[in-house]
Image (tube, rainbow, N blue to C red):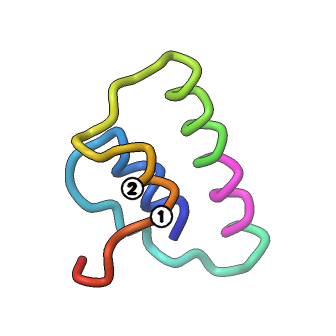
Amino acid sequence: MMDTVARTFFQAGVWQPEYLDNFRDEVGRFHEVLQDFGDLLERETPPNGISLEQLLQGPSPTQ
């Protein structure tokens, strides 16, 4: 879930990654997404139409 929110915070659309075969690979992907997200924050990339509060709260129940 966090990986989807982090990616769509800066990029338009919906990101629905395919399921990986094992938990270790999922954890690896999660760490890659965190690194990408950190890089975007360091570069002060403008968000894609949502506030920082929305990022921290996650998507609304209607989404």
Name the kind of residue labelled 1 in the image: Gln
Name the kind of residue labelled 2 in the image: Gln
Q: Is residue 31 magenta?
A: yes
Boundaries of the magenta span: 26-32
Residue sitting nearer the eye, 9 or 32: 9
Q: Could you tell me which residue is drawn at 78 percent across and 70 percent down?
A: 24
Q: Secondary structure at mark 2?
A: helix
Drawn side of residue 30 relative to residue 43, left or right: right
Q: Is residue 5 magenta?
A: no
Residue sitting nearer the eye, 27 or 58: 58
Magenta: main secondary structure:
helix
Give the position of the C terminus as an image quadrant.
bottom left
Drawn side of residue 30 relative to residue 18, left or right: right
What is the crowding at mark 2: few (fewer than 14 residues within 10 Å), some, or many (at least 20)? few
Q: From this view, report whether residue 43 is shown above or below residue 30.
A: above
Q: Quadrant of residue 28?
A: bottom right
Q: From this view, report whether residue 21 is shown above or below residue 7.
A: below
Question: Disc 2 versus disc 1: distance between alpha carbons?
Answer: 5 Å
Residue 23: x and y, percent?
A: 74, 78
Q: Are marks 2 and 1 in contact (CB under 8 Å)?
A: yes
Q: Could you tell me which residue is drawn at 44 percent across and 44 percent down?
A: 52
Residue 11: x and y, percent?
A: 29, 42
Q: Which mark is residue 57?
A: 1
What is the crowding at mark 1: few (fewer than 14 residues within 10 Å), some, or many (at least 20)? few
Q: Secondary structure at mark 1?
A: helix
In the image, farthest residue toward the top: 43
Residue 58: x and y, percent?
A: 44, 65
Q: Could you tell me which residue is drawn at 58 percent across and 26 percent down?
A: 39
Residue 50: x and y, percent?
A: 29, 46
- What number of labels is visible? 2
Q: Quadrant of residue 21?
A: bottom right
Mark 2 = which residue?
Answer: 54
